[in-house]
Amino acid sequence: AAAVIGGFLFSLILFEEKCEPDASQEAALIALYDSTNGTSWQWPSYRYRNNNWLTAEPVCKWNGVTCKGDCVTELSLEYSNLQGSIPTEIGNLNQLERLDLEGNTIRGSLPSTLGNLSNLKQLILNRNNISGSIPSVLGNLNSLQLMHLGDNSISGAIPSTLGNLSELQAMDLTHNRITGEIPSDLGRLSKLEKFHVYFNELTGSIPTTFGNLRNLDMLMLEGNKISGTIPSTLGNLNKKLNWIDLRDNSLTGTIPTELGRLSILSNLYVGVNDLTGTMPNEICMLQTTYGSATPFLMVDCEEVECPCCTQCCVDVTPVAANNCYWF
């Protein structure tokens, strides 16, 4: 028992030694306060009664700050009226596991020092005004599980280094201005469950390496400029993949029969492309093998013959009259 207790105390000492000095942590938080107009921060009354940042209270008791020991491990300042940019000093919070600044008015680019946060598990920055490109150093975040950067003004390409995020489960880059091709390296994200990049300006083809994403359950690529054919390798994802949305791209060719192996497929949207041929019978048969739920199959029936589709959409203008965009 003494050995177990001693080992536990030793592990605690090691954890505390990994922290930046208190002054460095506090300086990073003060930099965030100053760069995002901290005097105007607001919270709903049910969360915090008043703003206690930069008061005599210990840093670990400031609103939205969570610590383990003396180490800052979480910053949860979502919907708190932050206005400004994320300071480079944020990279000094080397034990940070969760950074949630969703729903503020943060502008400017993402600092490359975010790549220093080797313990970060959740990066939640959606619904801001962030611009610039995604720093390639984010590929250093080996513990990252969630990357939510949707609903911003991010431009540039998706860095291939993000394929190094071996723990990543969800990537949300929706509603941005991201260009370039989807890196084939993302096919190495063996734990990825959700890949949401709809409504960007992506080009190129869907990587065949996505057939390696055995835990993927949602593939959302709607509203880009993606071309080429639908990879038959997606049929390899027969244990998890249940939602595919490829609408409003420039895909060509036929719908691969291999998608009929997706035994739990519940939603397949491929309208507003340049596809041809007939919906494979293997996919039509899913409607009778899926069980109590019926797959939602939508194509543009002027392009693809589909006797089994639950909805034949018509790609017309104005968009308000275009049922290819309806669920």
Image (cartoon, rainbow, N blue to C red):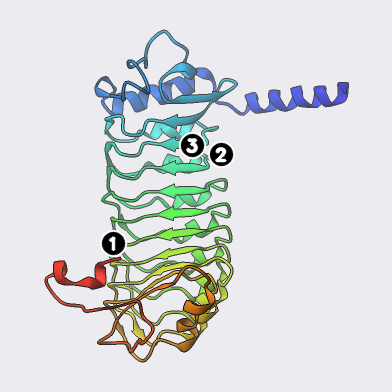
User: Which secondary structure lies at badge 2?
Assistant: loop
Sort mark 2 into few (<14), some (14-19) or many (20+) by Cα contacts within 10 Å. some
Sort mark 3 into few (<14), some (14-19) or many (20+) by Cα contacts within 10 Å. many
At 52% across and 63% down in the image, what residue appears?
216
Check if mark 2's residue and mark 1's residue have beta carbons within 8 Å: no
The residue under label 3 is: 98
At 28% across and 31% down in the image, what residue appears?
82
User: Does residue 48 appear left or right of residue 214 in this picture?
Assistant: left
Dot placed on the residue nearer the N-terminal end, 3 or 2: 3
User: Does residue 103 appear left or right of residue 4 in this picture?
Assistant: left
Q: Position of residue 15 (x, y in %)?
A: 65, 28
Total marks placed: 3
| Number of the label disc, if any, that sits on residue 185 | none
Q: Which quarter shows the C terminus?
A: bottom left
The residue under label 1 is: 199
| Number of the label disc, if any, that sits on residue 119 | 2
Splitting the image into 4 quarters, where does residue 304 fall? Answer: bottom left
Q: Which quarter shows the N terminus?
A: top right
Dot placed on the residue nearer the N-terminal end, 1 or 3: 3
Question: 43 or 145: nearer the eye?
Answer: 43
> For the residue marked with disc 1, what is the amino acid?
Phe
State the CA–CA distance, disc 3 to disc 2.
9 Å
